[in-house]
Amino acid sequence: MKVLKKAVTDYRIPLLAVVLFLIMALLKSNFASAYNVYSIADSAAGYGIAAIGFTFILLVGQLDISFGSVIALTACVLMMMLKAGMSFALALAAALVLGCVCGAITGFFVAKFRLSPFIVTMTMQLVYKGVALTITNSTPVAMQHPVLKAIYNVKLLNMIPLTFLFFIALAVLMEFVLRRTQYGRNLYLVGGNINAADNLGIKSGLYIWSAYAIQGLFAAIAGVAMMTRQFSASGNLALQGPMNVIPMVIVGGTSMAGGKGGVIKTVWGVLLMNIVFNAMTMFSIPAPLQPFVKGLILLIVIVSDKYMEHRHEKV
C-alpha cells in the first residue's frame, strides 16, 4: 500500500497525463488518431523547448517573463536572414547566439544588481518586442525555406514530428546536466538556499546569470522549432508564451521557490497541458474562454505549489 501511495505521489503527473489521454480517447474516437497525436506532439515541441530553459530559471528561484519576446526576436532574425539569401547554418547560428545574448543581458541585471526579476524581465520583454517590431517594420516575415520544410515533413510513424524528438533529446541531455554534473547540483543549492550557497563559496550570481543565458538559448531554439510549422515570424509571435509555459513547468513539479524539480518532470507537465489544450479544442470550448481556463489552471497550480511548500516547511 505504501509503495502504491509513493508511486502515485511521485508519478502523479505522468499518470494523470496517461489517464486523461485514455479518457479522451474513449470520449472522442478521433482523439487517438495519428493526425491528432501529431497535432499534440507538434504543438508541444515549441513551447516545450522553451519550458526546458524556464525550468533552469525556476530552479535558481528566479522568474523570466521576457522569453516570449526573445522567441519572437530570434525567429524574426532567422527568417529575415533566410529571406536575404543567407545560408541556413549562418542564420541558425545568429539566432541562437542572439537568444543567448538576450538571456545573458537580462540575467546580468538580475544577478549583478539583485534586482527584482519580475521588474527586469517585464522591462526586457518590452525592449526585445520593440526591437523585433522595429527591424520587421511591424510586418510578418514569411518564407518557406527548403530546410524548414524538410524538417516539417519528417514524421516518425507518420505521427511524431522531428521537432518533438529533438525536444525529448534536449530534455534528456539537460536532465543529465542537472543530475550528474557539479554545475547542476550547484543550481539546486543556489535555488534551495542562496545564502547557504554564498557561505559555501559558490558564486550564486554567476549561476543565476548562466540560467538566464540558458533560457535565452532555449527560447531561440523554440523560435526555430516554431518556424518549422509556421514559416512566418513577427514581433507578436509567442505573446502567450509565458502564459502557456509557466503552468507546464509548475505542473510538472518544479517549485517556484527554487531548488526543486527537473527537466523530465517538465516534459510530463508539457504533455499534460498540451493534452488539456487539445481537449478544449475537441470539446469546442470557445477561443475567448480558453485563456480563462489556462489562467484558472495557472492559479490552481500556484496555490497548490505554495500549499505544498508550507506543508513541507511544517514537516
Image (cartoon, rainbow, N blue to C red):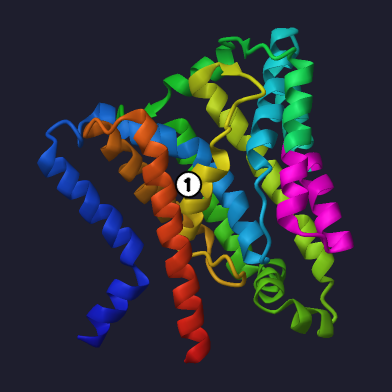
Whether residue 252 is visible, yes or no, is no
In the displayed structure image, the side of residue 222 where residue 102 appears, left or right: right
* Residue at which label 1 appears: 168
Seen as rendered, the residue at the extreme right is: 113
Question: Does residue 296 lie above or below 97 as drawn?
Answer: below
Q: Secondary structure at mark 1?
A: helix
In the displayed structure image, the side of residue 172 where residue 99 appears, left or right: right
Q: Which residues are magenta?
A: 101-125
Q: Position of residue 203 (x, y in %)?
A: 84, 71
| Secondary structure that dominates the magenta span | helix
Quadrant of the image occupied by residue 124: top right
Looking at the picture, tell me which residue is in the foreground, 58 or 189: 58
Asked if the magenta segment contains residue 108, the reply would be: yes
Q: Position of residue 107 (x, y in %)?
A: 80, 53
Q: Position of residue 24 (x, y in %)?
A: 18, 43
Q: Give amino acid for label 1.
A: Ile
Asked if the magenta segment contains residue 196, the reply would be: no
Could you tell me which residue is drawn at 20 percent across and 31 percent down?
A: 33
Could you tell me which residue is drawn at 59 percent across and 26 percent down?
A: 237
Question: Does residue 179 lie above or below 274 as drawn?
Answer: below
